[in-house]
Image: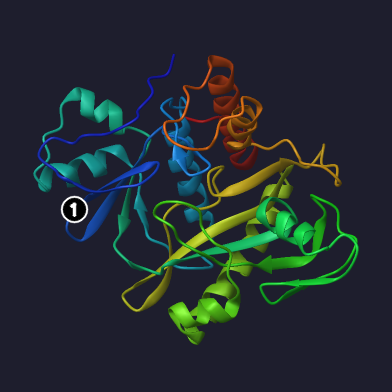
Amino acid sequence: MTNIVLSTNIPGLPRFATGKVRDVYDLGRSLLIVATDRISAFDVVMPTGIPDKGKVLTQLSRFWFLHLRPFIANHYITADPAFIQARLTEAGAVLDSETRAQLAGRSMLVLKAEVYPVECVVRGYISGSLWSEYRAAGGPERAVTIHGIELPAGLRESDRLPEPLFTPATKATTGHDENIGMAEMREIVGTEDAEAMRRASLDIYRLAAERALRNGIIIADTKFEFGIHNGTLTLVDEVLTPDSSRFWDAATWTPGQPQPSFDKQFVRDWLISIGWNREPPAPELPADVVQGTASRYREAYRRITGTPLP
């Protein structure tokens, strides 16, 4: 069985930051982002890891960063293990065989950027929190306006939207992100930067959605993060992964109901089925849920890139 990495430790190199999934190390002019196999649901990190999850996140982000490079600047430098190990050694790290194995395939060297405190969400289909807000506003029976966005009456869950929508959200280090409108985003980051991120997010989504659909994957929605590097708007963090996106099988897409997805919805559904109260501590995940989730992540990588996970 694949070794599961829940936490990393690089001797001689202090950890700069720890997120729900990623461990980040500061190398001076760059950052090392290590995607672990941790998985969160309802904003709580599970005690059980998912085999290969961190590798899928890293390698799929790498794929998209390279694919999108002609269209927008991004912070990706390399995921090459030898290059990364050389930079770590220069920074004072002591790399034994165990540490090298732990970092392999799940580490990415990136540029530093000043990151904006908003999530740039694009939705091509109505699902998740937008569907909940639409229903609460009476959307199925009448046209509604949500966060300044006009939506027609009669949409069903998982319907394709007339046009992709930009629906920003606040970034929460703990707890839930909160959907906001463009007016609120302009107040947070300024009008010019808000408009630049909106345009970039919609352009990236359209490019990626077309590319994925050719391989039988619907990108129902996704979220991007941006920063400024050397005065340039720069795509950062992860991009178009099963953690940041809702991936559906185009062949089985059936509007009017929730869709099977290649992401952590499998975990959420199990947690709901056992009546978990969504408060820490989270329960251990059973083996079938772990393996079912792992297979969905690997399949998302295979479908989108056309190759198995290396």
Judging from the image, the colouring scheme is rainbow
Q: Quadrant of residue 100?
A: top left
Rendered position, 263 above or below 161 = above
236, 179: nearer the viewer: 179
Image coordinates for residue 287, horizontal then vertical, percent: 53, 15
Q: Residue at x 58, y 74 (%)?
A: 198
Rendered position, 163 above or below 247 = below
237, 170: nearer the viewer: 170
Q: Quadrant of residue 110?
A: bottom left
Label tally: 1
Few, some or many C-alpha atoms within 10 Å of disc 1 (few <14, some 14-19, many ≥20)? many
Rendered position, 100 above or below 74 = above
Instruction: State left or right for residue 115 relative to residue 178.
Output: left
Q: Quarter of the image for the N terminus: give it.
A: top left
Q: Residue at x 21, y 34 (%)?
A: 9
59, 121: nearer the viewer: 121
Q: Residue at x 86, y 69 (%)?
A: 152
Helix, strand, or loop for circle 1? loop
Image coordinates for residue 81, horizontal then vertical, percent: 29, 38
Image coordinates for residue 253, horizontal then vertical, percent: 82, 42
Instruction: State left or right for residue 32 relative to residue 201.
Output: left
Query: Mark 1 sits on what residue?
Result: 27
Rendered position, 239 above or below 185 = above
Which residue reaches farthest bottom? Answer: 191
Amino acid type, mark 1: Leu
